[in-house]
Protein backbone atom coordinates (compact mmCIF):
# COMPACT_ATOMS: atom_id res chain seq x y z
CA UNK A 1 0.00 0.00 0.00
CA UNK A 2 1.35 3.43 -0.89
CA UNK A 3 0.28 6.37 1.27
CA UNK A 4 0.72 9.67 -0.50
CA UNK A 5 -0.29 13.03 0.91
CA UNK A 6 -0.36 16.05 -1.38
CA UNK A 7 -0.47 19.53 0.08
CA UNK A 8 0.20 22.14 -2.57
CA UNK A 9 3.66 21.53 -3.91
CA UNK A 10 4.54 18.94 -1.29
CA UNK A 11 4.10 15.29 -2.10
CA UNK A 12 4.75 13.00 0.83
CA UNK A 13 5.36 9.37 0.02
CA UNK A 14 4.98 8.15 3.59
CA UNK A 15 5.45 4.47 2.79
CA UNK A 16 8.82 4.99 1.13
CA UNK A 17 10.16 7.27 3.88
CA UNK A 18 8.90 5.22 6.81
CA UNK A 19 10.02 1.91 5.29
CA UNK A 20 13.58 3.15 4.87
CA UNK A 21 13.61 4.73 8.33
CA UNK A 22 12.23 1.63 10.08
CA UNK A 23 14.44 -0.80 8.15
CA UNK A 24 17.52 1.25 9.08
CA UNK A 25 16.40 1.69 12.71
CA UNK A 26 15.76 -2.04 13.20
CA UNK A 27 19.08 -3.07 11.65
CA UNK A 28 21.14 -0.48 13.58
CA UNK A 29 19.39 -1.27 16.88
CA UNK A 30 19.92 -5.01 16.35
CA UNK A 31 23.57 -4.37 15.61
CA UNK A 32 24.01 -2.35 18.80
CA UNK A 33 22.10 -5.03 20.73
CA UNK A 34 24.48 -7.72 19.48
CA UNK A 35 27.52 -5.55 20.29
CA UNK A 36 26.11 -4.81 23.75
CA UNK A 37 25.63 -8.53 24.40
CA UNK A 38 29.13 -9.28 23.21
CA UNK A 39 31.06 -6.51 24.93
CA UNK A 40 28.97 -5.98 28.06
CA UNK A 41 30.17 -2.99 30.07
CA UNK A 42 28.96 -1.14 33.14
CA UNK A 43 25.47 -0.11 32.10
CA UNK A 44 23.95 0.05 35.56
CA UNK A 45 25.61 1.59 38.61
CA UNK A 46 26.81 -0.80 41.33
CA UNK A 47 24.10 0.44 43.71
CA UNK A 48 21.32 -0.57 41.35
CA UNK A 49 23.01 -3.92 40.63
CA UNK A 50 22.89 -4.99 44.30
CA UNK A 51 20.98 -8.22 44.69
CA UNK A 52 20.86 -8.96 40.97
CA UNK A 53 22.03 -12.30 39.59
CA UNK A 54 24.71 -11.68 36.98
CA UNK A 55 24.60 -15.21 35.57
CA UNK A 56 20.93 -15.19 34.61
CA UNK A 57 19.74 -17.50 31.80
CA UNK A 58 19.69 -16.16 28.27
CA UNK A 59 16.29 -15.91 26.63
CA UNK A 60 15.37 -17.24 23.17
CA UNK A 61 16.08 -13.89 21.50
CA UNK A 62 19.53 -13.70 23.08
CA UNK A 63 20.25 -17.25 21.90
CA UNK A 64 19.18 -16.35 18.37
CA UNK A 65 21.39 -13.25 18.26
CA UNK A 66 24.28 -15.24 19.71
CA UNK A 67 23.75 -17.79 16.93
CA UNK A 68 23.80 -14.98 14.32
CA UNK A 69 27.05 -13.72 15.80
CA UNK A 70 28.82 -17.08 16.24
CA UNK A 71 27.51 -19.09 13.31
CA UNK A 72 27.14 -16.45 10.57
CA UNK A 73 29.20 -13.34 11.29
CA UNK A 74 32.13 -15.09 13.03
CA UNK A 75 33.10 -17.48 10.19
CA UNK A 76 32.74 -14.64 7.66
CA UNK A 77 35.31 -12.54 9.48
CA UNK A 78 37.64 -15.55 9.63
CA UNK A 79 37.75 -15.96 5.82
CA UNK A 80 41.26 -15.40 4.40
CA UNK A 81 40.06 -13.34 1.39
CA UNK A 82 37.48 -11.35 3.29
CA UNK A 83 37.97 -8.13 1.26
CA UNK A 84 37.69 -9.88 -2.13
CA UNK A 85 34.65 -11.87 -1.03
CA UNK A 86 33.01 -8.72 0.38
CA UNK A 87 33.44 -6.98 -2.98
CA UNK A 88 31.91 -9.99 -4.77
CA UNK A 89 28.95 -9.95 -2.38
CA UNK A 90 28.50 -6.19 -2.93
CA UNK A 91 28.53 -6.75 -6.67
CA UNK A 92 25.84 -9.42 -6.26
CA UNK A 93 23.78 -6.93 -4.22
CA UNK A 94 24.24 -4.39 -7.01
CA UNK A 95 23.08 -6.88 -9.64
CA UNK A 96 20.06 -7.88 -7.55
CA UNK A 97 19.10 -4.22 -6.97
CA UNK A 98 19.53 -3.47 -10.65
CA UNK A 99 17.62 -6.37 -12.13
CA UNK A 100 14.96 -7.03 -9.51
CA UNK A 101 12.89 -4.13 -10.85
CA UNK A 102 13.39 -2.13 -7.67
CA UNK A 103 13.29 1.57 -8.31
CA UNK A 104 10.74 3.71 -6.65
CA UNK A 105 7.53 2.92 -4.91
CA UNK B 1 12.14 -7.01 -0.84
CA UNK B 2 15.58 -8.42 -1.65
CA UNK B 3 16.08 -5.69 -4.26
CA UNK B 4 15.07 -3.06 -1.71
CA UNK B 5 17.49 -4.45 0.87
CA UNK B 6 20.27 -4.58 -1.75
CA UNK B 7 19.71 -0.90 -2.58
CA UNK B 8 19.83 -0.13 1.14
CA UNK B 9 23.17 -1.93 1.54
CA UNK B 10 24.59 -0.11 -1.50
CA UNK B 11 23.51 3.17 0.04
CA UNK B 12 25.57 2.39 3.14
CA UNK B 13 28.52 1.64 0.86
CA UNK B 14 28.16 5.10 -0.71
CA UNK B 15 28.18 6.51 2.82
CA UNK B 16 31.65 4.98 3.16
CA UNK B 17 32.82 7.84 0.89
CA UNK B 18 32.05 10.07 3.90
CA UNK B 19 34.53 8.11 6.02
CA UNK B 20 37.12 8.25 3.23
CA UNK B 21 36.69 12.04 2.98
CA UNK B 22 36.93 12.35 6.75
CA UNK B 23 40.10 10.24 6.81
CA UNK B 24 41.76 12.44 4.16
CA UNK B 25 40.67 15.59 6.01
CA UNK B 26 41.98 14.46 9.41
CA UNK B 27 45.22 13.23 7.80
CA UNK B 28 45.81 16.63 6.13
CA UNK B 29 44.77 18.70 9.15
CA UNK B 30 46.93 16.48 11.40
CA UNK B 31 49.94 17.29 9.20
CA UNK B 32 49.19 21.03 9.38
CA UNK B 33 48.82 20.93 13.16
CA UNK B 34 52.09 18.96 13.47
CA UNK B 35 53.86 21.62 11.43
CA UNK B 36 52.57 24.27 13.83
CA UNK B 37 54.17 22.36 16.69
CA UNK B 38 51.04 20.67 18.01
CA UNK B 39 51.46 16.93 18.48
CA UNK B 40 48.50 15.13 16.98
CA UNK B 41 48.85 11.57 18.18
CA UNK B 42 45.23 10.61 17.68
CA UNK B 43 43.44 9.40 14.60
CA UNK B 44 39.74 10.10 15.21
CA UNK B 45 38.42 7.48 12.79
CA UNK B 46 40.56 4.73 14.26
CA UNK B 47 39.30 5.67 17.72
CA UNK B 48 35.70 5.56 16.53
CA UNK B 49 36.06 2.03 15.18
CA UNK B 50 38.03 0.84 18.20
CA UNK B 51 35.39 2.20 20.50
CA UNK B 52 32.68 0.12 18.76
CA UNK B 53 34.08 -3.07 20.25
CA UNK B 54 34.95 -1.49 23.62
CA UNK B 55 32.62 -2.28 26.54
CA UNK B 56 29.72 0.16 26.69
CA UNK B 57 30.10 2.64 29.52
CA UNK B 58 27.44 5.12 30.61
CA UNK B 59 27.32 7.74 33.38
CA UNK B 60 25.56 6.68 36.58
CA UNK B 61 22.45 8.82 36.03
CA UNK B 62 21.96 7.84 32.39
CA UNK B 63 18.66 6.54 31.07
CA UNK B 64 20.24 3.29 29.86
CA UNK B 65 17.96 2.24 26.98
CA UNK B 66 17.63 5.78 25.57
CA UNK B 67 21.38 6.38 25.70
CA UNK B 68 22.11 3.10 23.92
CA UNK B 69 19.42 2.99 21.21
CA UNK B 70 18.62 6.65 20.40
CA UNK B 71 21.95 7.16 18.56
CA UNK B 72 20.84 4.27 16.27
CA UNK B 73 17.52 6.01 15.58
CA UNK B 74 19.35 9.28 14.88
CA UNK B 75 21.59 7.47 12.39
CA UNK B 76 18.54 5.77 10.87
CA UNK B 77 16.94 9.24 10.45
CA UNK B 78 19.77 10.18 8.09
CA UNK B 79 19.13 7.23 5.75
CA UNK B 80 15.85 8.62 4.26
CA UNK B 81 17.73 11.88 3.66
CA UNK B 82 20.45 9.94 1.85
CA UNK B 83 17.86 7.99 -0.14
CA UNK B 84 16.35 11.25 -1.40
CA UNK B 85 19.59 12.34 -3.04
CA UNK B 86 19.74 11.08 -6.62
CA UNK B 87 22.73 8.77 -7.18
CA UNK B 88 23.00 7.85 -3.52
CA UNK B 89 21.75 4.33 -4.06
CA UNK B 90 22.64 4.38 -7.80
CA UNK B 91 19.36 2.53 -8.34
CA UNK B 92 16.77 4.98 -6.92
CA UNK B 93 14.90 3.79 -3.84
CA UNK B 94 12.34 6.60 -3.94
CA UNK B 95 10.85 8.19 -7.03
CA UNK B 96 9.34 11.35 -5.61
CA UNK B 97 12.45 13.37 -6.31
CA UNK B 98 13.56 14.38 -2.82
CA UNK B 99 11.68 17.44 -1.71
CA UNK B 100 14.09 19.74 0.11
CA UNK B 101 11.63 20.73 2.82
CA UNK B 102 10.88 17.08 3.61
CA UNK B 103 14.60 16.34 3.62
CA UNK B 104 15.12 19.12 6.17
CA UNK B 105 12.26 17.77 8.31
CA UNK B 106 13.87 14.32 8.41
CA UNK B 107 17.21 15.96 9.18
CA UNK B 108 15.53 17.80 12.08
CA UNK B 109 14.07 14.52 13.37
CA UNK B 110 17.51 12.92 13.25
CA UNK B 111 19.11 15.92 15.01
CA UNK B 112 16.43 15.90 17.72
CA UNK B 113 16.96 12.19 18.39
CA UNK B 114 20.73 12.75 18.65
CA UNK B 115 20.27 15.69 21.05
CA UNK B 116 17.86 13.68 23.25
CA UNK B 117 20.31 10.77 23.29
CA UNK B 118 23.05 13.07 24.61
CA UNK B 119 20.66 14.63 27.15
CA UNK B 120 19.66 11.16 28.36
CA UNK B 121 23.20 10.73 29.75
CA UNK B 122 22.00 12.93 32.61
CA UNK B 123 25.24 14.77 33.46
CA UNK B 124 25.90 18.50 33.37
CA UNK B 125 28.67 17.97 30.77
CA UNK B 126 26.16 16.14 28.56
CA UNK B 127 23.73 19.04 28.98
CA UNK B 128 26.44 21.46 27.84
CA UNK B 129 27.14 19.25 24.78
CA UNK B 130 23.41 19.08 23.99
CA UNK B 131 23.21 22.89 24.23
CA UNK B 132 26.15 23.19 21.84
CA UNK B 133 24.47 20.75 19.44
CA UNK B 134 21.25 22.79 19.52
CA UNK B 135 23.16 26.01 18.77
CA UNK B 136 25.03 24.33 15.90
CA UNK B 137 21.78 22.90 14.55
CA UNK B 138 20.13 26.34 14.43
CA UNK B 139 23.25 27.90 12.89
CA UNK B 140 23.22 25.28 10.12
CA UNK B 141 19.55 24.72 9.45
CA UNK B 142 18.47 28.39 9.21
CA UNK B 143 20.75 29.27 6.23
CA UNK B 144 19.86 25.93 4.59
CA UNK B 145 16.13 26.64 4.88
CA UNK B 146 16.65 30.20 3.65
CA UNK B 147 18.66 28.90 0.67
CA UNK B 148 16.14 26.23 -0.32
CA UNK B 149 13.10 28.48 0.16
CA UNK B 150 14.56 31.42 -1.78
CA UNK B 151 15.86 29.25 -4.65
CA UNK B 152 12.49 27.45 -4.63
CA UNK B 153 10.79 30.86 -4.86
CA UNK B 154 13.07 31.76 -7.76
CA UNK B 155 12.00 28.63 -9.69
CA UNK B 156 8.37 29.18 -8.76
CA UNK B 157 8.56 32.79 -10.07
CA UNK B 158 10.28 31.69 -13.26
CA UNK B 159 7.33 29.36 -13.95
CA UNK B 160 8.87 25.93 -13.49
CA UNK B 161 6.53 22.94 -13.81
CA UNK B 162 5.95 20.82 -10.71
CA UNK B 163 7.50 21.06 -7.26
CA UNK B 164 9.98 23.99 -7.14
CA UNK B 165 11.53 22.54 -3.95
CA UNK B 166 12.42 19.25 -5.62
CA UNK B 167 16.09 18.36 -6.04
CA UNK B 168 15.23 17.39 -9.62
CA UNK B 169 14.13 20.99 -10.31
CA UNK B 170 17.47 22.24 -9.02
CA UNK B 171 19.23 20.22 -11.73
CA UNK B 172 17.89 22.79 -14.25
CA UNK B 173 20.69 24.98 -12.83
CA UNK B 174 18.97 28.17 -14.08
CA UNK B 175 19.76 29.92 -10.78
CA UNK B 176 23.50 29.43 -11.40
CA UNK B 177 23.50 30.95 -14.88
CA UNK B 178 25.68 34.01 -15.57
CA UNK B 179 22.61 35.75 -17.05
CA UNK B 180 21.07 35.97 -13.55
CA UNK B 181 23.90 37.63 -11.57
CA UNK B 182 21.89 38.35 -8.39
CA UNK B 183 20.75 34.76 -8.05
CA UNK B 184 24.26 33.49 -8.81
CA UNK B 185 25.84 35.76 -6.17
CA UNK B 186 23.15 34.89 -3.61
CA UNK B 187 23.61 31.16 -4.17
CA UNK B 188 27.39 31.42 -3.82
CA UNK B 189 26.98 33.33 -0.54
CA UNK B 190 24.58 30.61 0.66
CA UNK B 191 27.12 27.92 -0.25
CA UNK B 192 29.83 29.70 1.74
CA UNK B 193 27.56 30.28 4.76
CA UNK B 194 26.28 26.68 4.87
CA UNK B 195 29.72 25.10 4.42
CA UNK B 196 31.31 27.26 7.07
CA UNK B 197 28.49 26.50 9.54
CA UNK B 198 28.88 22.71 9.29
CA UNK B 199 29.65 21.65 12.88
CA UNK B 200 33.34 20.77 13.17
CA UNK B 201 36.30 20.78 15.50
CA UNK B 202 39.29 23.05 15.03
CA UNK B 203 41.54 20.67 16.96
CA UNK B 204 41.91 18.12 14.19
CA UNK B 205 38.81 16.03 14.91
CA UNK B 206 37.04 17.00 11.68
CA UNK B 207 33.29 16.52 11.85
CA UNK B 208 33.25 14.11 14.81
CA UNK B 209 30.67 15.15 17.39
CA UNK B 210 32.78 14.58 20.49
CA UNK B 211 36.45 15.23 21.07
CA UNK B 212 38.63 12.76 23.00
CA UNK B 213 38.29 14.57 26.31
CA UNK B 214 34.55 15.25 25.90
CA UNK B 215 32.12 13.08 27.91
CA UNK B 216 34.80 10.52 28.94
CA UNK B 217 32.29 8.48 30.96
CA UNK B 218 30.27 7.77 27.78
CA UNK B 219 32.02 5.08 25.76
CA UNK B 220 31.45 2.10 23.52
CA UNK B 221 29.22 1.51 20.51
CA UNK B 222 26.65 4.29 21.24
CA UNK B 223 29.44 6.90 21.34
CA UNK B 224 30.83 5.57 18.04
CA UNK B 225 27.33 5.65 16.52
CA UNK B 226 26.97 9.33 17.46
CA UNK B 227 30.41 10.09 16.02
CA UNK B 228 29.53 8.34 12.75
CA UNK B 229 26.16 10.13 12.73
CA UNK B 230 27.95 13.49 12.91
CA UNK B 231 30.36 12.57 10.08
CA UNK B 232 27.53 11.30 7.84
CA UNK B 233 25.40 14.37 8.60
CA UNK B 234 28.21 16.70 7.51
CA UNK B 235 28.71 14.66 4.35
CA UNK B 236 24.99 14.72 3.52
CA UNK B 237 24.93 18.51 3.91
CA UNK B 238 27.87 18.75 1.50
CA UNK B 239 26.12 16.40 -0.97
CA UNK B 240 22.85 18.39 -0.78
CA UNK B 241 24.59 21.72 -1.28
CA UNK B 242 26.80 20.33 -4.07
CA UNK B 243 23.54 19.32 -5.73
CA UNK B 244 22.65 23.06 -5.87
CA UNK B 245 25.73 24.15 -7.82
CA UNK B 246 26.82 20.97 -9.63
CA UNK B 247 27.20 21.60 -13.40
CA UNK B 248 24.16 19.48 -14.28
CA UNK B 249 23.86 20.99 -17.75
CA UNK B 250 27.18 19.47 -18.83
CA UNK B 251 26.50 16.02 -17.40
CA UNK B 252 22.93 15.90 -18.65
CA UNK B 253 24.36 16.22 -22.16
CA UNK B 254 25.94 12.80 -21.68
CA UNK B 255 22.51 11.24 -21.27
CA UNK B 256 21.08 12.75 -24.45
CA UNK B 257 19.89 10.17 -26.96
CA UNK B 258 19.99 7.20 -24.61
CA UNK B 259 16.86 5.83 -23.03
CA UNK B 260 18.69 3.48 -20.65
CA UNK B 261 22.30 4.55 -20.57
CA UNK B 262 23.94 2.77 -17.70
CA UNK B 263 27.36 4.00 -18.71
CA UNK B 264 26.11 7.62 -18.60
CA UNK B 265 24.48 6.93 -15.25
CA UNK B 266 27.80 5.52 -14.02
CA UNK B 267 29.74 8.55 -15.31
CA UNK B 268 27.27 10.88 -13.59
CA UNK B 269 27.53 8.83 -10.39
CA UNK B 270 31.34 8.92 -10.39
CA UNK B 271 31.47 12.62 -11.35
CA UNK B 272 28.97 13.66 -8.66
CA UNK B 273 30.62 11.73 -5.81
CA UNK B 274 34.14 12.77 -6.87
CA UNK B 275 32.94 16.39 -6.74
CA UNK B 276 31.34 15.86 -3.32
CA UNK B 277 34.55 14.22 -2.06
CA UNK B 278 36.68 17.05 -3.43
CA UNK B 279 34.37 19.73 -2.00
CA UNK B 280 34.25 18.01 1.40
CA UNK B 281 38.04 17.73 1.66
CA UNK B 282 39.10 21.07 0.16
CA UNK B 283 36.11 23.39 -0.40
CA UNK B 284 34.63 22.98 3.07
CA UNK B 285 38.06 23.28 4.71
CA UNK B 286 38.71 26.54 2.84
CA UNK B 287 35.33 27.88 4.06
CA UNK B 288 36.24 26.92 7.66
CA UNK B 289 39.58 28.74 7.35
CA UNK B 290 37.93 31.87 5.88
CA UNK B 291 35.37 31.73 8.70
CA UNK B 292 38.18 31.61 11.29
CA UNK B 293 39.90 34.60 9.64
CA UNK B 294 36.68 36.64 9.45
CA UNK B 295 35.84 35.94 13.09
CA UNK B 296 39.35 37.00 14.10
CA UNK B 297 38.91 40.35 12.30
CA UNK B 298 35.49 41.15 13.75
CA UNK B 299 36.07 42.08 17.35
CA UNK B 300 32.53 42.89 18.47
CA UNK B 301 30.57 40.56 20.76
CA UNK B 302 28.95 37.66 18.83
CA UNK B 303 30.54 39.16 15.70
CA UNK B 304 30.56 35.84 13.83
CA UNK B 305 26.87 35.26 14.47
CA UNK B 306 25.95 38.75 13.25
CA UNK B 307 28.11 38.35 10.15
CA UNK B 308 26.37 35.09 9.18
CA UNK B 309 22.95 36.56 9.87
CA UNK B 310 23.72 39.50 7.58
CA UNK B 311 25.16 37.22 4.89
CA UNK B 312 22.11 34.91 5.03
CA UNK B 313 19.67 37.82 4.76
CA UNK B 314 21.67 39.40 1.92
CA UNK B 315 21.78 36.12 -0.02
CA UNK B 316 18.03 35.58 0.49
CA UNK B 317 17.26 39.11 -0.72
CA UNK B 318 19.47 38.69 -3.80
CA UNK B 319 17.87 35.41 -4.90
CA UNK B 320 14.31 36.62 -4.14
CA UNK B 321 15.00 39.89 -5.99
CA UNK B 322 16.10 37.90 -9.05
CA UNK B 323 12.89 35.85 -8.82
CA UNK B 324 10.74 39.01 -8.67
CA UNK B 325 12.70 40.55 -11.57
CA UNK B 326 12.17 37.46 -13.73
CA UNK B 327 8.44 37.23 -12.91
CA UNK B 328 8.04 40.96 -13.80
CA UNK B 329 9.85 40.41 -17.10
CA UNK B 330 7.62 37.42 -17.84
CA UNK B 331 4.50 39.47 -17.01
CA UNK B 332 5.66 42.36 -19.25
CA UNK B 333 6.37 39.92 -22.08
Image (cartoon, rainbow, N blue to C red):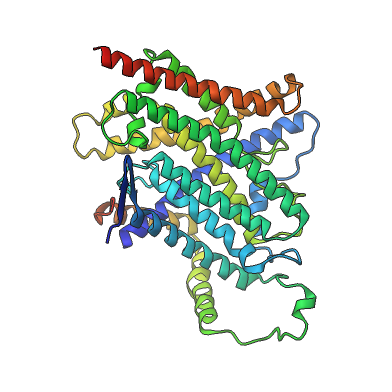
- In this rendering, the count of numbered labels is 0
Q: Position of residue A40 (x, y in %)?
A: 67, 72
| Residue depicted at 38% across the width and 25% down the height | B154
| Residue depicted at 53% across the width and 54% down the height | B75
Residue B252 in sight in this render = yes
Q: Position of residue B187 (x, y in %)?
A: 47, 23
Picture layout, residue A100 above or below residue A56: above
Residue A93 in sight in this render = no
Q: Is B123 on the left or on the right of B104, as rendered?
A: right
Q: Nearer the viewer, residue A80 or A35?
A: A35
Q: Nearer the viewer, residue B150 or B75?
A: B150
Picture layout, residue B211 above or below residue B291: below
Q: Is A17 on the left or on the right of B53, as rendered?
A: left
| Residue depicted at 76% across the width and 67% down the height | B60
Location of the C terminus of chain B by quadrant is top left
Location of the N terminus of chain B by quadrant is bottom left
Q: Nearer the viewer, residue B12 or B298?
A: B298
Q: Is B265 on the left or on the right of B142, as rendered?
A: left
Q: Position of residue A49 (x, y in %)?
A: 75, 79
Q: Position of residue B20 (x, y in %)?
A: 54, 42
| Residue depicted at 74% across the width and 49% down the height | B128
Q: Is A87 on the left or on the right of B194, as rendered?
A: left
Amino acid sequence: MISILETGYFIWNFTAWIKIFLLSAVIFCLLIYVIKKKTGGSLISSKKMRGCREDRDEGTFEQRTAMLRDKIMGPWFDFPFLHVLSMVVLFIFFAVALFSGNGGE
Amino acid sequence: MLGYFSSWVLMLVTLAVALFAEAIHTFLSGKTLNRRGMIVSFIPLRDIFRSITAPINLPENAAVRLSIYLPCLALAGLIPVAASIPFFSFVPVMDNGGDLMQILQFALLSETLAIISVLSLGTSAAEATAKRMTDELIALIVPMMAAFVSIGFYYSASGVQGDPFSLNTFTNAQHMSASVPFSLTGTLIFVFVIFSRIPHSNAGFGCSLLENCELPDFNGAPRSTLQLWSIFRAFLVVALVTHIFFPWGFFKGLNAGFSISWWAQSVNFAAFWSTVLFIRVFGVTVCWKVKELLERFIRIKNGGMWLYMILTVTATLLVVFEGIRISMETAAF
